[in-house]
Image: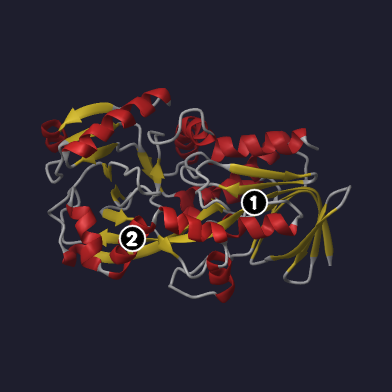
Amino acid sequence: MSATADFVVVGAGIVGLATALEVQRREPGARIVVIEKEAEPALHQTGRNSGVIHAGVYYTPGSARARFCREGKTEMAEFCTAEGIAWERCGKLIVAVDAPEAERLGALARRAAENGVEVEPLTGAEARALEPAIMAEAALWSPTTGIVDYGAVARRMARILADRGAVLRFGVAVAGAREGAAGVTLDLADGSRLEAGRAVVCAGLQADRMARAFGAEVDFRIIPFRGEYFRIRNQPPDLVRRLIYPVPDPARPFLGVHLTRKLDGGLTVGPNAVLAAAREGYGREVSGRDLADSLGYGGFWRLLARHGRAALDEARGSLSKAAYLAKVRRYCPQIGLDDLVPYRPGIRAQAVGRDGRILDDFLFVATPRSLHVCNAPSPAATAALPIARHVVDRLLAEA
């Protein structure tokens, strides 16, 4: 069986769905098909993150991450408000627990200013007045940070697409892809075939494999990092009323565990970052292919050599609940071991170069008839709408 479309989008996470919406907006008569191998949207990174609408404090000034986040936080709030999706601008405290961390807050405040992000430096006393359960030598207050359920956002996007005539095919994986002068052909795992004029691939954890399937030249590999969370119990629901983040450590590639308020009440803490043995191994499954892809890649070992101490510390926290708790108790000593209940984990699709460096900005790779979102780190969910505009700008310009 064969079908045809003007545009196909592979991947029904929030970036793929936002991209399909943007195509639909600009090309209202186009035949659009979204292909998703799972039974419903947002089952991977979109539905398994902290649910934060980021303000853009951390990102390198001038980077795509900084620009898209600045635009995206406003647009995501507007989309949720217009569609009746619950969200909250609760704000965030970035807390320093000692003098060296307090010094690093100054550089962070300057970076936020360069990014046009509103922050307010606080003394330790001022931070504790806002959040009495928190230990702080000093802090930065980010009032424009918010929280939302990105899975709910993605599901609403899918409904809008379908209501406007797009075809969404769930439970169908892409088994093969070919690109010709007139368009692309997708061989699907159910035996059917889809031919389209142009394709956008937002494949997340499978981004490198899908790009290669289309004939794109990629000089990176997706390394999956498992992020483990805990739900906080036995504590008052207003233990903290804002998001609480640690000061980033420049020696570590990832941000560190933080306390996040949830829209349905209560708090979570996390995530850490440990190598996953399967790209979609939420239950600690082991995939021989995925593990071989990571361990057989020179860039992984160069990354490990650069961040070996941090990797050992993250592994210790994964194996020991007490070691994990120690990270949290640096800034919230009230939380105890019995307060940590396992919460759904996530897996970060991290693109790593051959030199072992983490690709810390968005990466888009084009072929004549397709465009691939190859690296979409945080704040990709926050920035999904401006990312979609960028993707469609390129897709239509290169047509």
Q: Can residue 43 be seen in this view?
A: no
What percent of the width, then of the height, locates residue 178?
81, 58
Disc 1 residue crowd, few under 14, some 14–19, many 20+, Cα 10 Å: few
Amino acid type, label 2: Glu
Residue drawn 30% across and 52% down?
A: 257
The answer to whether mark 2 and mark 1 are in CB contact below 8 A is no
Residue drawn 23% across and 32% down?
A: 103
Mark with earlier residue (2, 1): 1
What percent of the width, then of the height, locates residue 29?
78, 40
Query: Disc 2 and disc 1: Cα gap in Å?
Result: 27 Å
Q: Is residue 368 visible?
A: yes
Quadrant location, the N terminus: bottom right
Amino acid type, label 1: Asp
Position of residue 132 relative to residue 226, above or below, is above
Pointer 1 residue: 219
What percent of the width, then of the height, locates residue 339?
19, 63
Q: Nearer the viewer, residue 202 or 323?
A: 323
Quadrant location, the C terminus: top right
Position of residue 263 relative to residue 109, above or below, is below
Say which mark, if any, is on residue 231.
none
What percent of the width, then of the height, locates residue 329?
17, 54
Q: Which colour scheme is used?
A: secondary structure
Pointer 2 residue: 314
Position of residue 243 relative to residue 41, above or below, is above
Residue drawn 38% across and 28% down?
A: 111
Q: Quadrant of residue 243?
A: top left
Q: Which of 222 and 76 is in front in this view?
A: 222
